[in-house]
Image (tube, rainbow, N blue to C red):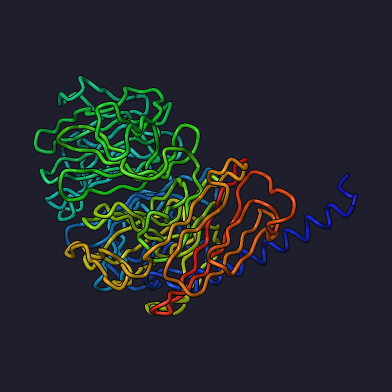
Amino acid sequence: MKEKKNLGKMNKITNLKKIVIVFCSLLLSLNIYGQGGTWVWMHGSDLPKPNAIYGQKGVSSPLNQPGMLYEAIEWKDLAGNFWVYGGRLRSLPGTPANAVLWKYEIAINEWTWVHGDTAFGVAPVYGVKGVPSPTNTPGERTFGGTTWTDLNGDLWFFSACTILTVIPDLWRYNIATNQWTWISGESSPSAFGKNGIKGVPSASNYPPPRGESACSWTDSKNNLWLFGGSGPFDNLNDVWKYNISTNEWSWEFGANGGLVYPVYGIIGVESPSNDPGSRCVYSRYFDGGNNLYIFGGTGINGNHSDIWKYNLTSGMWTWVGGPNGLNDNGSYTAYCDDNDINLPANRMESRTSCGNSCGLWIFGGSSNSATELNDLWHYSFKTNSFEWVSGSGSQMLTQNCGTKGVPSSSNYPAGKNGGNAWLDDEGNFWMFGGWQYNTLWKFIPDKECMSCVTEKDTTKINPEKVEEFPVLFIPNVFTPNGDGQNDLFEIVNKGYDEFKLSIYDRWGVKMFQTNENNLFWNGNLSQTGNEASAGTYYYSLDLRENKTKKTHFYRGYLTLIR
């Protein structure tokens, strides 16, 4: 069977070559035009699988660097420094995690090995609950711990996994004393949490253990919040609050174990019955007021790409945006457009995300169809819209670092699962770790692209940008069944003097092309040929504005339903 070389196979190979050429040319155009900022290689190696260079404990050095770490846990302290703890060598299955705490200082561009043993697989040393000690250590941790920086500057985390199990323990690290304290929960991996009565804090309460989650917030009253993750048996949908001053946990929302499917309700409308459902969430932010936000994550039967908001006062969820289904492919239309068309693909392990009062940054992760994505998105809660800022929706295993410390439009990072991310005080996006690399990257946003770029900024309306698309609507589905409704893939547009639309099937075969802005695809090959089968197609749209002569490049997917 394998040796047969028939004409059908040769045609399939030819078509595969076509789609490779098509997508390579599309990716080239996406990387050339309109990117919303510039990447800078700041520290670490540009090569895969680097080893750690520890140096002297407690002493920074330009030579120091963490190794390649997968799903380490991270913080940003009140002085603006970045911290990472634990993580494992993702390329070696079964390899234990480490127990090292690192600090990165932006001002001097140096790492410091701060605490912990350099060996992998270190067991926790709990000491006495509530009592700090220089010998205490959480031990090896990985697979997505839930972390907080409190308003006093201490670093906290709950649970996270060892290589073999997950433990429901809460830890605090004091930067000034360089000591860990076991604060709450249990030290036994057989402990499954104590929910207590919903809404009632108690010193005996503590959440079930969990990993694969980075969904945490510190509110304005210095309470610590968490949501979801992967529990001992199932994904979770619970919301918990920890009161630092009373040392009490309270179970605020969700089920006490068991899988829960999402209940979306009406978009934009808060309801006590709304529920994001059980999921592992990596992308989250606090708007600085009264609302906690989450994006996407891994649900019961696939990945999400939706936005939810949790109101701290009412204790209710609101479905804010994004699709209410699973495994949506997203829409990659054009860089720097905060329109209703742009939408990230579904994804998991997008730990390289962080937010501030402007909104949420999301980099990479894996969708249901591609691993190690290198796309960068920004979500603004003020406009409830996504801007596609950099990268592509395809797998990217390599990177182009350029010259260390030098921004360049040709620089780009490799795709990333299980990395870490921070925002500096100027609104620049930083990321580190994940699969293969220990490269520390900084992304400098183009302020003409972003509607909001720093915590101090207010939402900015760019008059020139408002005029870019006086009328433009690209549908994502049409039904050419002859009923007179939605029979054409009709792109509504106005204000452009050049228009070029091409549509391809999944093998790269061109189904339709036009330079006329009022000619639309009817679902047949070249308009008069055989009917195209139901399924997903790829479109390429190039436009030029009448007035400014600016060009715009839109790429995305459409669904044909018969």
Locate the N terminus and report the quarter of the image it occupies: top right
174 vs 23, nearest the viewer: 23
Q: On the picture, is 270 further left or further right than 334?
A: left
Q: Position of residue 250 (x, y in %)?
A: 19, 28
Q: Is residue 86 visible?
A: yes
Quarter location, residue 406: bottom left
Q: Position of residue 273 (x, y in %)?
A: 29, 26
Q: On the picture, is 337 further left or further right than 149?
A: right
Q: Position of residue 184 (x, y in %)?
A: 21, 33
The residue drawn where x is 40% and y is 72% is 41
The residue drawn where x is 17% and y is 58% is 78
31 vs 348, nearest the viewer: 31
In the image, farthest residue toward the front:
484
Q: On the picture, is 182 further left or further right than 261?
A: left
Query: Image height check: is 157 above or below 200?
Result: below
Q: Is residue 140 visible?
A: no
Q: Position of residue 260 (x, y in %)?
A: 39, 26
Query: Image height check: is 195 above or below 358?
Result: above
Query: Image height check: is 119 above or below 548?
Result: above
182 vs 147, nearest the viewer: 147
Q: On the picture, is 508 further left or further right than 382?
A: right
Locate the C terminus and report the quarter of the image it occupies: top right
